[in-house]
Amino acid sequence: MTLAVPLVKSCGDCPIRYKAVCSKCEPDELAELEGVKFYRSFAAGQPIFFSGDPLEFVGSLVSGVASLTRTMPDGRVQMVGLLLPSDFIGRPNRETIDCDVTAETDVLLCCFRRKPFELLIQQTPHVGQRLLEMTLDELDAAREWMLVLGRKTAREKIASLLHMIATRLASLEFKQTSHTSFTLPITRETMANYLGLTIETVSRQMSALKKDGVIAFNERRDITVPDIDALKTETGEDG
């Protein structure tokens, strides 16, 4: 899927400035980050990392969506995560990466060479503090996703994924409204792989949610959520 990649020249005009690993940085800390960062873009479908690759850089997703997958020895593949804007790729103090990372849409990354970034964490407390917060948030999200995959119905799984994407994208724009619209950044095949469903089941449940007025969509993946609370109810966690 092709998306417009934003033109970012500095941290000051970055769309994820207040959500990413640099969100708590003071001006002098931002200046240090500016000195060691660089941008890389990836086309939809292009690999960003292969599992086992040397982890030469880490970074934040500025725009687009990427997937994390693991491959078993017999060739079976499981998607284990989706990366949305402001999410962090890679782990400091690790020599290699343990997942395949693929651009699901056109992606722009704000990258940091791993070794200089590790030194920066020691020297700039706000970077280390924010990275810890993001890691703990990722742990909470992983636990939540265990519930989604293990106990929820197909309809609840679809609603949970749509609700997660809708609220994450809205948070980047600091929106707090009862309704929202967004372009679904992944295909139904990707949704099926992530949720452990068939493409047919995904299509059937999407159509059912549309028929019931929970969502609206067209052939271009433009999703409208008239009532975000109603969508949350469909996740099975309205309480």
Image (cartoon, rainbow, N blue to C red):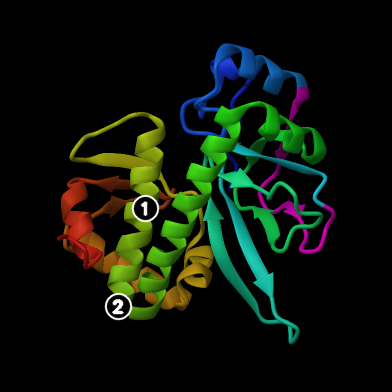
Q: Secondary structure at mark 1?
A: helix
Label 2: few (<14), some (14–19) or many (≥20) C-alpha neighbours in 10 Å: few
Residue 105 image point, x, y percent = 60, 47
Q: Which residues are magenta?
A: 36-54
Residue 214 image point, x, y percent = 20, 56
Magenta segment: does it hold 196? no
The reply to whether residue 77 is in sight is yes
Q: Is residue 2 above or below residue 124?
A: below
Cβ–Cβ under 8 Å for marks 1 and 2: no
Q: Is residue 216 above or below residue 192?
A: above
**8 with respect to 186 (left or right):** right
Residue 108 image point, x, y percent = 65, 36
Instruction: Name the residue beneath numbered marker 1.
Output: 164
Residue 50 figure quarter: bottom right
Residue 84 image point, x, y percent = 51, 46
Q: Quadrant of the C terminus?
A: bottom left
Residue for point 41% across, 33% down: 172
Residue for point 39% across, 43% down: 168
Instruction: Name the residue beneath numbered marker 2.
Output: 153
Q: Amino acid at mark 2?
A: Thr
Q: Amino acid at mark 1?
A: Met
The reply to whether residue 112 is in sight is no
Residue for point 58% across, 68% down: 79
Label 1: few (<14), some (14–19) or many (≥20) C-alpha neighbours in 10 Å: some
**204 with respect to 226 (left or right):** right
